[in-house]
Amino acid sequence: MSDNNPFEPIETTPFQSHSSQNVHGWERVGSLAGGVLMMGKGLRRGGVIGLAQLAIGGMALARGITGHCSAKTLLEKNRQNLHHARARIEQAGEELSRMKASAEAATGTATVTGNDSLNSPKVGL
């Protein structure tokens, strides 16, 4: 797919093993601890809200165990795309400034021949 397409196909499913770890250190420990706490809270609470807490805790626990987070991968990719776009905009701005300076230099040395309608308008109109 092209680099400009923000929609990329999903290449892995949540049940496949991920080769790259993007969650490290305290972030991973926090996911493990938060997942265990949230699952315990969901089990104690029960009901629909408890089930939601259990599911969220399970996702956080899985994130901590595997060391991979698909949402973080997507956010990092979008951040890289943003930096790339910013660099291209800055490069285009620099090119525009160079073109403006070149145009000003070219018009500064140009001579105009003929009638200048601002200084000596045509008579009879």
Image: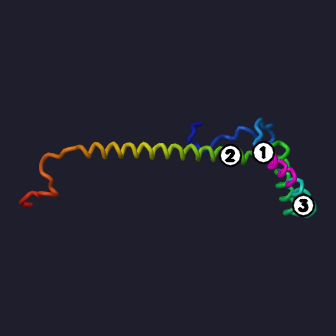
**Which residue does the image show at 45% across and 46% down from the upper left?**
93
| Observer-nearest of 100 and 56 | 100
Give SS at disc 2.
helix
Question: 12 or 26, which lies in front?
Answer: 26
Secondary structure type for disc 3? helix
Q: Tell me the amino acid under the disc marked 2.
A: Leu
Q: Is residue 101 left or right of residue 78?
A: left
For disc 2, the neighbor class at 10 Å (few under 14, some 14 to 19, many from 20) is: few
Q: What label does residue 74 carry, if any?
A: 2
Above or below: residue 22 compared with residue 57: above
Q: Position of residue 31 (x, y in %)?
A: 83, 51
Kind of residue indicated by mark 1: Val
- Report the disc number at residue 41: 3
Task: Kindly give the residue lying farthest to the right in the view shown.
Answer: 44
User: Residue 64, position in %: x, y?
Assistant: 83, 47
Separation of marks 2 and 1 at Cα, in angstroms: 13 Å
**Where's residue 55, x and y in %?**
84, 54
Q: Is residue 12 left or right of residue 37?
A: left
**Residue at the spot x=30%, y=44% of the render?**
105
- Write down the quadrant of residue 95 in the picture: top left
Magenta stretch encompasses residue 28: yes
* Cα–Cα span, label 3 and label 1: 24 Å
What numbered label is drawn on residue 23?
1
Magenta residues span 24-34
Comparing 37 with 4, the one in front is: 37
Q: Nearer the viewer, mark 2 or mark 1?
A: 1
Residue lying at 9% horizontally and 60% vertically, measured from the top left: 125
Q: Is residue 88 magenta?
A: no
Residue 68 lies, with reference to residue 39, above or below; the image says: above
